[in-house]
Amino acid sequence: MSMRPANFDYQRPTSLSEAIQLLANNDEAKALAGGHSLIPAMNQRLSTPEQLVDIGRLDELKGISTNNGTLSIGALSTHAQIAASSDVRTHCAALATATGLVGDPQVRNWGTLGGNLAHADPASDPPTVVLAAGGTLHLQGPNGTRSVSADNFFIDLFTTDLQPGELITRIEIPSLQGKKNAYVKLAHPASRYAIVGVCVVLEMNGNECVSARVAVGGATPKATRSPSAEERLTGSSLQVAAVDAAAEALVNDIAGDVMGDLFAPEDYRRAMAGVYLKRAVQAAMA
Amino acid sequence: MQLTGSYKFNHEQQAVWDVLMNPDAIAKALPGVDELIPVEGEPDTWRADAKLGIATVRGKYSGIVKLSEQNPPNQYRLTVSGSGQNSIIDGTTLISLSYDADNQQTILNWEADVQISGKLASIGQRLIGAAANMMSKQFFQGLEKQLPKS
């Protein structure tokens, strides 16, 4: 099996607008950020873009900051930078956890949040957290800028709302400081991809959970919220019976969509989705 | 690999059957396909080229599409065999229609047996089921768009 890519043209634009122009001009061009999903596919010749537009050095897409209670993460921030960021740890601890669990150190040091979300691999960790956290993706393309909520961004397996020529510029997440949140995953022992990953965000008033967001990934074709599990948790005091009911509701919500493979069949993933919801609630409240 | 799924059309069963049997409509609905070219001497059999992509995996495939075992307007078999991306794909689907008079919907159920060998099989096993579901949904939505609004 060949492990070298087919020939391609390489461009390294010096501005975001130039990058968008290049991508908009060529259907067969691909944006290159960290390259940790695209390059392996090219090396196997499963992906043969005519042109790579290397956006990796565009400063406009870098940096992590907090403004007025909103966490803003540049699309080119690497998983390692996000996992180590004190802003992220303070305002979205679950994302720091998730990015710290992606792949291996090489992947975390090169792979970027923007590239990860644009790729929308169902077994990846960050989409699940960005969805549960109520994130917003800021996009720029040939027709200008727009923003899309994570709820509307992930459409299906490896399929997002990104239009031809559009790039993710940054990701905004409302501060979860004061809300309990956690991400837990069952990782494939070799690839570290999520067999199941669950993120919960719980707003507490004393012992009562007044609002909840629950998202699951790994088991489903895309990061998916579970409205029924959210309903079971909301208004409860997170007692065992309520969390058990939420786990069952989550499993029912995703039942028809669960993907299986030789390593982890559908039934096993369904069962683990319930187990990992309970663990996510426990981790958030710990 | 065994896969199953269903799709609901808000149309009469005969109208759904007619569009399922119409090669121009099928060509329009098949993701990445421009036209179906009849194979001489083989009834209800067409050659097609498709340009398909999921994620970074994009490529050209070519293959044969065949309709058989027609029992109008209730059941038929759709067989696809093709190759591309250093892989061979063989699939056969039994498609059954029934009419739900209460909801005025035609319900289509499909049961497929898909065999994939080569490079796609080696990397894509965890994704084949989900990819098949996504593409079948695109196909049936593509057909439904061509039915008159009811």
Image (tube, coloured by chain):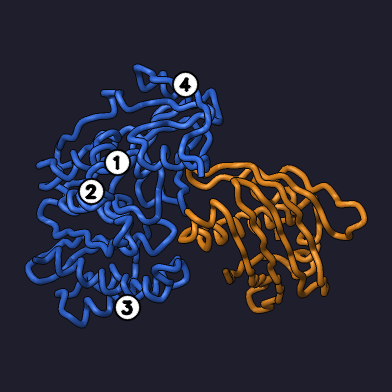
Q: Position of residue A25 (x, y in %)?
A: 53, 23
Residue at the disc numbered 4: A21
Quick one: quadrant of the C terminus of chain B?
bottom right
Labels 1 and 4 in the same subunit: yes
Residue at the disc numbered 3: A248
Name the N-terminal-most of marks 1 and 4.
4
* In this rendering, the label closer to the viewer, 3 or 2: 2
The dot on residue A99 is 2
Residue at image coords 25%, 48%: A104
The dot on residue B101 is none
Q: Is residue B27 above or below residue A20?
A: below
Residue type at mark 3 is: Glu
> Marks 1 and 2: CB-CB under 8 Å?
yes
Q: Chain of mark 2?
A: A
The dot on residue A113 is 1
Q: Which chain is orange?
A: B
Q: Residues under labels 3 and 4: Cα distance?
A: 48 Å
Q: Quadrant of residue A20?
A: top left
> Marks 1 and 4: CB-CB under 8 Å?
no
Q: Position of residue A150 (x, y in %)?
A: 35, 48
Mark 1, residues whose alpha carbon is within 10 Å: few (<14), some, or many (≥20)? many
Q: Residues under labels 2 and 4: Cα distance?
A: 31 Å
User: Colour in which chain A is shown?
Assistant: blue
Quick one: quadrant of the N terminus of chain B?
bottom right
Mark 4, residues whose alpha carbon is within 10 Å: few (<14), some, or many (≥20)? some
